[in-house]
Image (cartoon, grey):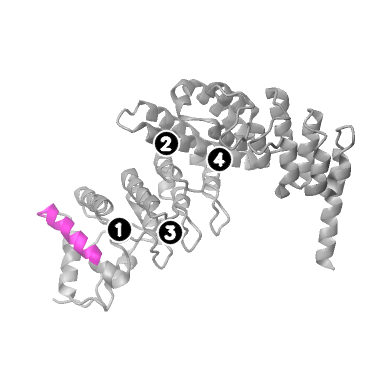
Amino acid sequence: MSKSLHNFTIREIPVCDGKQYGRTVSHNALANILNSSNSEDVEVFTSLVSRAMDKTPSDFNVQTNCLFHLSNKVALITGLTPLNFAAALINAGVGTQKGFDELKLLVEKILNKVNGLNLLIKDNSGFTTLHWMLAFEDTKILNLICQKMKEQNVSIDLQDNNGHSALSWVFLPPIAQDCKLVVDIAIVLIKPGANLGLKSEDNLSPIERAVGNPKLNSELINITFKRMQEEDTTKSMQEQDTTNIVKACFKLICNFLATERSVAENKFKQHVKVVTTKLSEISEKIKKYLDINDVFEALKIQSIGIIELLSKMLGLNINDKDTNGDSILHRAIKDETDPNFCEALITKLCYNTLDTDNSGNTPVQLIIIEPKLHTKKGAEYIGVLYKRGGITANDKELANNCWPEITNCFNDNDTFNVKQAIEIYWFNRILRCLRLTI
């Protein structure tokens, strides 16, 4: 008996209960797709659905072709891309494991063979193709689509209507129920630059979700280190890809610890010990994949022990610089780490406070010329550097040109009145507040 698309329902398709990836995975999603009045051939359309979702297909090649034609027809009707529709079928429930595998092969084929895929398209919920592809929980597929996005210069941080990036969903159920899967998928997304600090509308970032999840909090570091260690022994992978994976793992650990430091100090201290021990254990295996930029990444942890270990592991001198001429101390100041941590860098690691970057600026001069550092913290930095001989005869004149409020805090004998500078900061801040209220 013929069915119109207006009353077509897919009751024969097994579905999952509840919600996955923020989408209701009931009949509704597919029913809305199929209940469009724009289809020209209802019988063909419903036949394709039936074959595509057959639990015991006689010919899997036929089923794959049905999926391909069905997904293209859906794209014409609704604008939902073939890739997104394939993921929708996964969420609806594919009848057999073989059918699931065939569907993955179809997606891989589309990603590998089809040119001109529009990866910027969003559905009504704001989901991109990358969001939908999480349904496969497959790193090979996610690597393929991330590569396509890179080729098209499409941001990997596109957010849905609730502000969730793809990485944000990795740290939410159902993926977040499996810590190994979380790490594997997160690494795929972090490699090309997914932002661990990007907040969704609930004001939580992906890494904050990880810290706040008891299961992830207890397992993430161990599993990530295991992944780093495994990458070194994986002979089939290109060394550059191994390097990117190890760096992504290390970035995940650094961001995890940095976030935990501000919300769970006791756990943070325990985990710093764990990370220090594990870094020592595998240092010989991973040191060839890390460089000074990874030391910069570790600055956000604000652990002298980890910085010292990394520097020793990589054979770095504390005054070594990156290509921009930034030393570890220059970067610590640019990243606005705690002044006490900067003082510990200087005292415990014997930093030369008069060392200059590629522009010829000492750390004090960097603070004076950088407006964002014209703060209480900036004054505290200068006070720390002054105690270690970091002020020169030229700094007062430079301050007069770039940060005149603190010029008089520089004395003629190359000393600095940090207390006065902080008082000036607070005075000027109060004045600004008064002006806003008048």
Is the Cβ of the residue at disc 3 closer than 8 Å to that at disc 2? no
* In this view, the mark in front (3 or 4): 4
State whether residue 246 is above or below residue 438: above
369 or 103, nearer to the observer = 369
Q: Which residue is painted at 42% across and 36% down in the image?
A: 245
Residue of label 3: 22
Q: CA distance from mark 3 to mark 2?
A: 28 Å
Q: Quadrant of residue 369?
A: top right
* In this view, the mark in front (3 or 2): 2
Mark 1 secondary-structure assignment? helix
Dot 3 or dot 2, earlier in sequence: 3
Q: CA distance from mark 1 to mark 3?
A: 18 Å
Residue of label 1: 83
Q: CA distance from mark 2 to mark 4?
A: 15 Å
Q: Is residue 69 magenta?
A: yes
Residue of label 2: 245
320 or 161, nearer to the observer = 320
Q: CA distance from mark 1 to mark 2?
A: 26 Å
Residue 202 in sight: yes
Q: CA distance from mark 3 to mark 4?
A: 25 Å
What secondary structure prevails in the magenta region? helix
Q: Amino acid at mark 3?
A: Gly
Q: Position of residue 293 (x, y in %)?
A: 54, 35
Q: Position of residue 313 (x, y in %)?
A: 53, 22
Residue of label 4: 255
Q: Which residue is painted at 82% across and 66% down in the image?
A: 437
